[in-house]
Image (spheres, grey):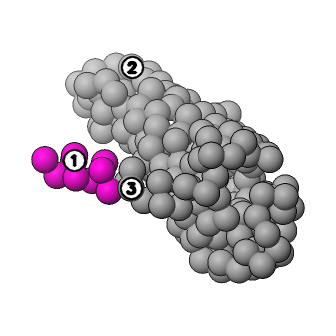
Amino acid sequence: MKMKIGLTSLFMITLFFGGPAIAQKPASIGYFRCGLNLNSSWPEKGRLFLFPAINLTPGLRILQGRDFAMALTLPISAGYSSDNYYHTGYFGLDVPAMLEFNFGAAAGNSATSGLGFMLGAGAGYQIAGSYDNSSFDDEYRPGDMDFWGYRLNFGVSFGKDSTGDRTMVVANFGKSFTPDRKYTVSIGFYMILGNRRKLTDRYPASEQ
């Protein structure tokens, strides 16, 4: 019952903020942000991996207004991953597909809003390296720190650039689908490329 109420509320919020754009073909459907993040990933009974990375997030705006954007995004993170026990380096890659709801400044469409937030959910794949999966009585058994799992993210954006460009801090949590539980958390700092210049034909100047 609570989930139904929550989904209904989210749907109503989406209609309220995105309503002006529903009946119009978007002038630009592109979405992009980029930046740096720090990931921490670990298996339930294994070692912690630290994974600093460069992030590029292309996406498509499904629905948008001055202070709202619903987007399908593909946040690709690539960097150096290391096991904190053996200090072994690996190439790390994290590729989730997300559905994100951006409000206020996070939409990249507003010239006046200085604060915004983003909520997102999806699923993705991460590979961060290998680790020792043996017990005290076993010989060395390597395990791979790679998994498919669900993702949840939350972001806060700020800034008042006239083009709609904004900075954003995003936190992410993920957990594997499989019984051998693996987890990842990350924090990142990004720049959202604004979309406001491409919305000038859609809204009167007095509304921007």
Q: CA distance from mark 3 to mark 1?
A: 14 Å
At label 3, which amino acid type do we have?
Answer: Met
Residue corresponding to mark 2: 141
Task: Bin the neighbour count of mark 2 within 10 Å (Cα to Cα): few under 14, some 14-19, many 20 and up.
Answer: few
Q: Is residue 126 above or below residue 17?
A: above
Q: Are marks 1 and 2 in contact (CB under 8 Å)?
A: no
Lateral position of residue 49 relative to residue 43, left or right: right
Lateral position of residue 90 relative to residue 2, left or right: right
Comparing labels 1 and 2, the label whose residue is closer to the camera: 1
Residue corresponding to mark 1: 3
Residue drawn where x is 70% and y is 56% of the image? 36
**Viewer-side residue, 176 vs 162:** 162
Comparing labels 3 and 1, the label whose residue is closer to the camera: 3
| Residue 89 among magenta residues | no
Residue drawn where x is 44% and y is 44% of the image? 121
Q: Secondary structure at mark 1?
A: helix
Q: Quadrant of the C terminus?
A: bottom right
> Which of the marked residues, 1 or 2, is nearer the chain's N terminus?
1
Q: Is residue 60 above or below residue 65?
A: above
Give the magenta part as a residue range: 1-9
**Viewer-side residue, 38 vs 132:** 38
Q: CA distance from mark 1 to mark 2?
A: 42 Å
Does residue 162 appear in this view? yes
- Residue that lies at the very extreme toward the left in this rendered image: 1
Residue corresponding to mark 3: 12
| Residue 8 among magenta residues | yes
At label 2, which amino acid type do we have?
Answer: Arg
Comparing labels 2 and 3, the label whose residue is closer to the camera: 3
